[in-house]
Image (cartoon, grey):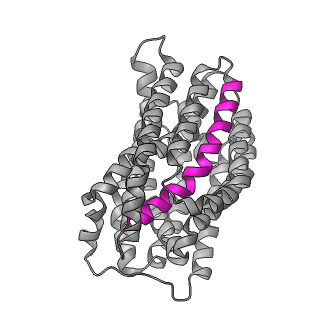
Amino acid sequence: MSLVTFLGIYFVRRAGIDIATVGAAFLCEHGLRGALAPMFGALSDRIGRRALLLPAALATAAILPCFLLVTGPAGLFAWSIAMGVAGAVNIPVSNALLLDLAPVERRQSVLALNYTLMSVAYTLGVSPAGYVAEKGYDLLAYSSSIGFLLVAALYALALRKPLPLEKSASGVMRNMVSAFRDRTFLLFALMAFVFPLSMGMVVAAAPVFGAESGLGEGYIGLVLGGNSLIVAVLAIPAATRMEALGPFRLLGGAAALVAAALFSYALIPDVAAALLVGTVVFSFGEIVFSSAVPAAVAGLAPAGRRGAYQGGWALVASFSMGSALVLSGWLKNNFGPDFGWQGTWLVYALLVAVAAAALFFARNGFRTRALR
C-alpha cells in the first residue's frame, strides 16, 4: 500500500500518462481482481485456503516491481491486468481464513486486529515512502516485492498444520454465484459500496489532488501515514466495544463521517489543510467500517459459503475502489473549468451522505437476517 499510494503520481507525472487513462487501468486491475474473487473464494471453500494463498503471494512478488518498465498506456494496462489476476486471491481467501479461525462472537475484533496490523505497517511505510518516491521509485518497487516474498514465507511456515474449514457441499460454480442471488446481500452491497469507493478516493485520488495543487509527495505521505496511525491506535478498542452491538449498527454513522471528510476536501480553501482535516475525519469512519463490513458479510453468509460471500464482497469492493480515480478524472475533466476537484469531492460527498441514511434505516433488517 505504501507503493500503491504513489503509483497514480508516478504514472501521471513520471511516465507522462493521462490521469483518465491511469484511472481506467486501475479500474481494469481492480475489476479483474473483483471478477475473479468469487471464483477463488468459492474454490477455497472446497480445497482450503493454503493452496491458494501461497502461490498468489509469490506471483505478486514477481509482477509488482514491473511497473518500472511501464512507459505508455499499453504497458500500463498489461501490468494492471497481471496484478489484477495475481491479487484476486488475497482479500477473499485471507479474510475467509481469519473468519475460520475466529469464534463467531469475536469476528469483529479479529478483523480489527488484522486491519490494525496493516495500518501499522502502512504507517511505517507510507511516510518514508513519500520521501523515497521524490528521489526515485526503484527502491520502493523492490522493497514491496521483498515484502510479498516474506508474506509467502510466512504462509509456508504458519499454515503447515490442518486448518479448520467448514466445507461446502455444493459445487464451486454454484457457490461462486450464490452471493449474487441473495437479495439481502445485494441490498447491503448497494449501500456499503461507498466504503471501498471512499478508500479509493483517499488512497488514489486525494494524492493526485494534492500533487496537482502543488503539495509534495513527502507531505502527502505524512498525512496518509497519520491516517493509518489513528486507525492503528483506535481500531481494536473500538471494535471490541462495537461487537456487542453487531456489525450493522454503526455503519450509517461511519458513512456520515466519510461524507464529512469529503465535504472537507471540497470546502476548505487551503489544500494542505483540506487534505489534513479531511483525512483525519475519514480515519474515524474507517475505524468502524474496516472491521464491521467484512464481519457483516460473514454474518449474511450461509454455512459453507464464507469464502464465496467474501469473494462476492471483494468483487464489489474492487470495482468500487478501482473506479475512484477514473471517476475522479472523468468528473474533473468533463464538467467545465469551474467544476474541478471541488465539484468532484462534492459529488462524492453527497453520494456517501445518501448511503449513510440508507444504512441507518436498514440496520435492523440486516441484523435480523444475520441472526436468522
Left or right: residue 355 versus residue 62 is left
Does the magenta stretch mainly form a helix, a strand or a loop? helix
The quadrant holding residue 278 is top right
Residue 142 on the magenta segment: no
* Image coordinates for residue 157, horizontal then vertical, percent: 62, 81
Tell me which segment is drawn in magenta: 272-301
* Image coordinates for residue 8, horizontal then vertical, percent: 55, 37
Q: Foreground residue, 84 or 284? A: 284
Left or right: residue 76 versus residue 159 is left
Q: In this view, does 162 lie above or below 194?
A: below
Count of marks, rendered view:
0
Q: Foreground residue, 317 or 255? A: 255
Residue, x 39% and y 46% (percent of image)? 319
Does residue 77 appear in this view? no
Q: In which quarter of the image is the C terminus?
A: bottom left
* Image coordinates for residue 189, horizontal then vertical, percent: 37, 50
